[in-house]
Amino acid sequence: MILKYLSKKELAPVIPIAVLTVLQVYLDLRIPGYMEQITNALQMGSASAVVQEYGLRMLLCAFLSLACGIVTGYLAARTAASLARTLRARQFDRVESYSKEDVGKFSAASLITRSTNDVYHIQLVIARQLPNVIRAPVMAVWAIVMIAGKNWEWTAATAAAVLVLLAVVTFAVVRSVPRFRRVQWLTDGINRTTMGKLVGVREIRSYNAEGYEEQKFSRANDALLENSLGTVRIMAPMIPVVSSLNNFLTLAIYWIGAGIIQSTAALDGKMFLFSDMIVFSSYAMKIISSFMMMSGFVRSLPRATVAAKRIEEVISTAPSVTDGAGNTVGIPTGLIFDHVSFCYPGTDRKVLDDVNFRVGPGETVAVIGSTGSGKTSLISLIPRFYDVTDGRITLDGTDLRNYRLDDLRGRLGYVPQEPAIFSGTVRYNVNYGAGAADRTEADIWRALQVAQAADFVRETEHGLDTEISQYGRNLSGGQKQRICIARAVCRAPHLYLLDDSFSALDFRTDRALRAALRQETAGRSVLLVAQRIGTIMDADRIVVLEHGRVVGMGTHQELLRHCAVYRELARTQLGVEAVP
Amino acid sequence: MSADPYGPVPSPPAGPRWARRTATKNLNGAVRRLFRYMGSYRRSILLGIVFALLSSALALIGPQYLEQITDLIAGSIRSETAVDLVRIGGIVLLLLGLYALSILFSYLQHLIVPSTSQRLANKLRQDLSAKLDRLPLNYFTGANTGDLMSRLTNDADTIGESFGPGITMFISSLTMVAGALIMMVYTDPRMALVAAAPGVFGFLLIFGLVRRSQPYFIGQQRDLGALNGLVQEVYYALDIVRAYGGERTSKDRFTVINERLWQSGFRARFISGMMPRLMGFVNNLGYVTVCVFGSMMIIDGSIGYGVIVAFIVYVEQFTHPIGQIADSFSDLQSVGAAAERVFEVLDAPEMDPEPDAVALPAHICGEVEFRDVRFSYVPGQEIIHGFSQHVAAGQKIAIVGPTGAGKSTIANLLMRFYETDSGEILIDGIPTRRMPRNYVHSLFCMVMQDSWLFPGTIRENIVYAKKDVSDETVRAACRAVEIETFVESLPQGLDTPVGDTDELSAGQRQQLALARALVKDAPMIILDEATSSVDTRTEQHIQRAMDRLTAGRTSFVIAHRLSTIVNADLILVVRDGNVVEKGTHQELLKAHGFYRDLFDSQFADCN
């Protein structure tokens, strides 16, 4: 099971937990046992000495039972926490080593839940149920053994009560599970409608659709109510019946007891039976409560096994993109795409089809194309977020797959389409990743300067140590993008990969940045993906992609003359007047 | 790869119910307000409470009869007479009846109370939803959405799940404890003292435990939140983490939090595990004291055996509800906190009430006039300083400006999403302030960037709340925006469900939004030309559709295309929300001002 992830040392407490739990059961069951003795003594005659002695023993049992409970609670909590810690760390390590394909199999949101919520749930279940798992069956068996020697009528009554308990609980669980699932589904529906109202408030008002939306909402709301009421109706009898079982059982025991005592002739027989009767009801209570404990455990099991399975899946998935041998050639030929084709894993559709182009040392190459042309996929092949399906990509003479991943990525300065900001200081965000220790404050400021971000950072109170909140909420879109660009510049990489990185900037800033970048990257290679023709017009080479194929390559002027797709693109963006 | 648009995945709730401190500023006030709000549902809850009390009362009587039975049996053994089975049988039957009645009352309680609670939640949700329609637009800012969403869903749910049961359990537990105490004193005062002592001791212990444990739970909550935050951040930004070799830094950060969480989680769990164990101990202790002192009193001859039997039950009935009091009290605290948040929304100031009905013309030409309009989103920060402009019917006004310059402010004012601070906007000579808001809305077709489609069919989205729209009209609209062939290629055609998922591309969604506007067929248009990440062909469809839409109608267009700007009757240049320049294209170019600058940087390189 999932416990296998615990080390020997962490697993060790399970033995003392088991031992102490059994001991605790013994102690708990001893207390009514002493009472039986006392009752016998009382019937015989004066028994104050007995009462005192056994009274003290009972007290001792109670205290020792508590002590056992505290220790087992401590150990169980510790074990559960250790397991949780291990599971979290193992998952985190795994996910960090995943490729995009691996993450895609689960979805980022699911991975987050598995690393946090699911682990929490397992921790909860183990801490709560580990002692119970041992305690409930031991208590049930022991108590049954205690009463086995006594009258079968009482045993039968107890068995009947247990059966009723199991029947009621099973019935309630079976009937209610589908309903709960439906409640979840209906609640999701309401949440979606509510979210829609918040997001689409402008549309709703401008189309005077308030009434229409209200109707939809009422329907969903009322459906949820109907379902909830149905669940209440099913569950309503359960609690009263279960909690009254103890009462009925006690009553049955005393009624039966009366009858048995009546039919017994011997006086001391009667007396023993009387004490038996008093004690039997205590044992019967314990049996019922241990079955309730077990049903509680069984009810928590499905959710826990699901969580365990989900965690297991994450840990056991091996990453699909791994280090290469690491024997690099080092010929400065730049980046070469050599008959590269690419399909997303699991699909047949070629996102890139026989793409050939080159980014020589010191060159700026732009890739342009409309949505779905394969631009972003192209960029993600270079840091090996995915591997090519056909053909090969070489960097400075070596196939990308032969590089060690940290070596390859160390040469790249990647700026994604959507800015990614970490919570932390500006310093942390800009001077990020491997090699951070080797870079100086001056490097950071220089990078910010190039990215046109130095001004707004300087204006803040703490400069580089200004805290950026999660997802960069206290920054504008343009500021976030500039920080991401600064991050790349700070690395001084051999090859810049800029994926539509200027979209959030206004034209002025865009131009200034590109000018600064051109200076900074002189001598280094830049691969630039863009939508706006204005951004790429002065590239050394422009590659035009459509439906994954290269339909044109050349400078801006050349393409205007020879490439119909490019011309159309220009016309759309700049207007028919600008592009005759 | 971008962050989940619905916000971060919430942390799991930490700690047992009785230890979760949800800060209620005024629990009493919140619960009272809920009671007032409940209106007629109050009766049902009170009825439920009555049933709970009846059920408890019956359960409390039970041990008296058990005592009788025990004494009868013990007596017959002692006096060596026959057991009076008939009499005992009578008592057994009586008890059976009592227990059955108790079950009935308890069943009724468990039927009425949760049902009423759910109905309350239903009403709350309905009222909240209706309230949203009356709130001014600035309530719906981005920062608010997640919090607002939580109030409408989580908080309403909390109230529905826990209010009724919480109140009922709280009151009935209190009563049970009091009742058990009373019965104990009634049965035998000295024994009552002895039996209640462990319970009281236990209660004090738990009270102290809850107090002391707060910091541990806050700590665990904090660490869980930090872990969640880090994991989310890293997992959503994995591309960057990988591309920059940031795995180790992230792992280091992670390990620090993980270790802290191990500590706080272990401690919190240990403490929460203590409570049931303590309750068990108190129970045992109660049993022991009853048995020991009871036995000594039997030796004294002061009580019969039955008293012990009764007290064994009473001890249970006294100590068990104590735990329930703690649980239900914390439930009520959660409900109180949720209620406070919900009432905040219900109390929020609404938009100005609608004016008295004024004679509205049957047909609007589309003549618009701005008269010395002043406006500020934030009081004290005026962004529109006395803007005046006359727009003849059918004219095209282009609005340009740098990214995020507040170009939609004018649209907001026209639509009366926001009210002007002073000055007026007149349509066909009538001030818009004198028109009901939904009338103003009906005069404009508004298509902005990222238009919202709701979960429904294509047809529903295009028709959207307009009555009596024939399929032919819908198809004509699709044809006009050039999406008809696409729709017909779908297996379900117009009945294809769309919504917040991504079966449609951004461009197709915009086409549907344009079709919707065409169907609405209002006399004036407000349009944002920005097309986000759209392929060439679709872009052309959209541009032609936009041209069709604006033909012959007064149009306010946030312009992105050269042709729109050049051909506009008037250009409004917006900067930081304010109109800084206006004129035709040629006029503005000659002025060599801000417009010239903007124009050059955007379009210069193409000539």
Image (cartoon, coloured by chain):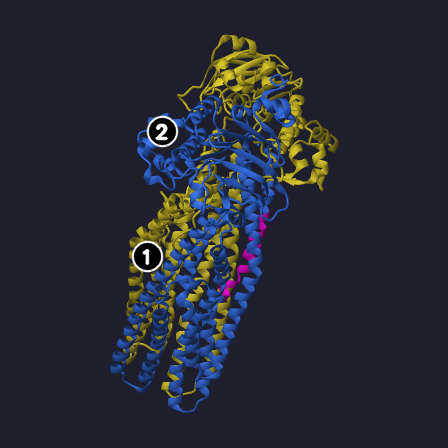
Q: For the residues carrying marks 2 and 1, which lies nearer the camera in this image? A: 2
B194 in relation to A489, above or below: below
The prevailing secondary structure element of the residues shown in magenta is helix
Chain bearing mark 1: B
Check the rendered structure and report the hue given to chain B: yellow
- Residue B233 visible in image: no
Check the rendered structure and report the hue given to chain A: blue
Left or right: A87 as drawn, with respect to A207: left
Which of these two is toward me, A50 or B98?
A50
Q: Which residue is mark 2?
A: A446
Left or right: B551 as drawn, with respect to A451: right
Left or right: A425 as drawn, with respect to B476: left
Q: Magenta includes A238? A: yes
For residue A90, which quarter of the picture?
Answer: bottom left
Chain bearing mark 2: A
Q: Are marks 2 and 1 in contact (CB under 8 Å)?
A: no
Q: Which residue is mark 1?
A: B267
Q: Which residues, given as a range, are shown in magenta?
A: A223-241
Which of these two is toward me, A355 or B413?
A355
A435 in relation to B90, above or below: above
Quarter of the image with the C terminus of chain A in it: top right
| Residue A535 coordinates in the image, percent (x, y) | 52, 25
For residue A138, which quarter of the picture?
Answer: bottom left
Secondary structure of residue under mark 2: helix
Circle 1: residue type: Arg
Circle 2: residue type: Arg
Left or right: A453 as drawn, with respect to B300: right
Which residue is at a point 53% across and 30% down the rendered structure image? A366
Label 2 and label 1: CA atoms lie apart by 47 Å
Secondary structure of residue under mark 1: helix
